[in-house]
Image: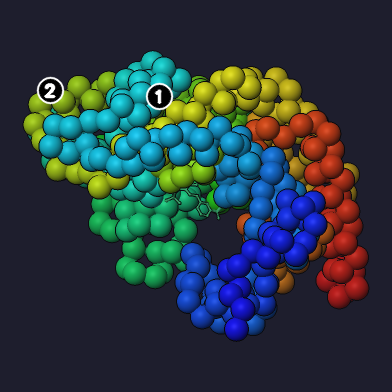
Amino acid sequence: MTNPFDIRAAEVPPALVRAAAQVDTRAIQALDSAHYLHPFTDHKLLAGKGARVMVRGEGIYLWDSEGQRVLDGMSGLWCVNVGYGRKELADAAYRQMTEMPYYNSFFNTTNVPAVKLATLLAEVAPPQFQHVFFANSGSEGNDTVVRMVRRYWDLLGQPQRKVIISRHNAYHGSTMAGASLGGMSYMHAQGDLPIPGITHIQQPYWFEHGRGMSKDEFGIKAAGWLEEKILAIGPDKVAAFIGEPVQGAGGVIIPPDTYWPEIQRICDKYGILLVSDEVICGFGRLGEWFGCEKFGFRPDLMTFAKGVTSGYIPLGGVLVGERVATVLIEQGGEFEHGYTYSGHPVACAVATENIEIVRREKLVEKVRDDTGPYLKQQFEALIDHPLVGMAETCGLVAGLVLVKDKKSLECFAPELGVGMVCRGHMFGNGMIMRAVGDRMIIAPPLVVTRAQIDEMIALIRRCLDATLAELRQRNLI
Ligand code: PXG
């Protein structure tokens, strides 16, 4: 029996080796379904069709094991901000691995890459953030937030302040605390979530909840739901509010400009901690270093992950504002929390190099001044397509809504899975665009060029046409 993991490079021309490692797709798929449990996956269904095997990435493109090139409109999973194939990041990991692959930061010990990264984060984050707690993912970051917020109020002699308010359709991770903070009801349905002390208000999604009023009016109204909830619970019992500046996994829900400043005002009024989950929005995605800067609010804590390393290696954490840091440090003694890999030297070395790339190549400015506005112009022009009821962008995230009737904005019945039909056409035609219900979304790498945006929009348009043709053929429109 041949070994499916052997890359038979010698047998194929070098150009093909670069395009796609030659692997035996069927054999890998069989072993995949025999042994590998994927995240958020129906394995019976997957076994029937076999997983697509991705083998190589370069810039904004990926290649699968059949040699097909795809334009990765999702930056992996909202993370490969500097694009694939960055040797600088591999070199940073190699250097650190050979020098000192691991040591912990418990027991009064530290390591140089962790200190370097903490210092750099304090430099690029808004000025109130001078401290950082490292974890390995966004979920662990948000678990840290829950523990830290409750510890803060305990130390201030207000242990009754336990409740953290989040939003329906938010995504904050998949651990017990992360999934509880998240507002995905299908996640709550598995495993008795949310855990106690976490509650949700409605999301600021104008298209679903605000039509008939101006976006600015709706922003104030949606923020008002926070105040209503605080008053219903009792202000002295509320510890914090958490939100993504733009909801990512929920379908790129871009709030009206009035929303976040009003949320800030309400949190200030009741003395409630404000937490910005910057796992997607942080590190330049919205054209500012952090999403809170884009929307003009001043959080006390910020969760980060993904873009901090461009996904090359797992790293996440919490940036801790001075309000919380001072109490934890001055009054807290030991905070009984931490991970084996908190401040992992290799992850921190890669993150530092990644942030240096973002700075060197001025990617934040590029998104703010060049590619962000260009994507807005090109993507929002898709509104002329018969299937598109709304199209909007913010920096380098974008979402459009597929509708049955453009005039009335009537949506398709959810069980038709029109978004998935569209995603199928995208995926089959070399374009990775996600479907969240019937919202089609993208978040391309920050290195994307104008020409590549043109290519992406042309692909999207072609696949929208194919979707429309299929819906007509099936008499669904
Ligand atoms: N917060 C936010 C805002 C996220 O987007 C997490 C926390 C959790 O991070 P980790 O590293 O624990 O996965 C995320 C993750 C999707 C999708 O379907 C999005 C995420 C993860 C998986 C799927 O868009 N975001």
- The secondary element bearing badge 2 is classed as helix
Above or below residue 461? Residue 345 is above
Residue designated by label 1: 121
Whether residue 421 is visible to the viewer of this picture, yes or no, is yes
Of marks 2 and 1, the one in the foreground: 1
Ligand 1 under 8 Å from disc 2 Cβ: no
Taking the image as shown, residue 234 lies to the left or right of residue 419, namely: left
| Identity, as a three-letter code, of the amino acid under mark 1 | Leu
- Relative image position of residue 458 (x, y in whole percent): 87, 45
Q: At 83% from the left edge and 34% from the top edge, which residue is drawn?
A: 451
* Labelled disc at residue 183: none
Residue designated by label 2: 330
CA neighbours of label 2 inside 10 A, class few (<14), some (14 to 19), many (20+) = few
Marks 2 and 1, Cα distance to the nearest angstrom? Answer: 22 Å
Among numbered discs 2 and 1, the one appearing first in the sequence:
1
Q: At 45% from the left edge and 24% from the top edge, which residue is drawn?
A: 297
- Relative image position of residue 399 (x, y in whole percent): 69, 45
Q: At 80% from the left edge and 38% from the top edge, which residue is drawn?
A: 452
- Relative image position of residue 88 (x, y in whole percent): 56, 32
Ligand 1 under 8 Å from disc 1 Cβ: no
| Identity, as a three-letter code, of the amino acid under mark 2 | Glu
370 vs 86, nearest the viewer = 86
- The secondary element bearing badge 1 is classed as helix
Quadrant of the snapshot with the N terminus? bottom right
Q: Quadrant of residue 343?
A: top left
Taking the image as shown, residue 51 lies to the left or right of residue 33, namely: right
Q: At 52% from the left edge and 44% from the top edge, which residue is drawn?
A: 311
Above or below residue 339? Residue 256 is above
Taking the image as shown, residue 352 lies to the left or right of residue 99, namely: right
- Relative image position of residue 145 (x, y in whole percent): 30, 41
Taking the image as shown, residue 367 lies to the left or right of residue 97, namely: right
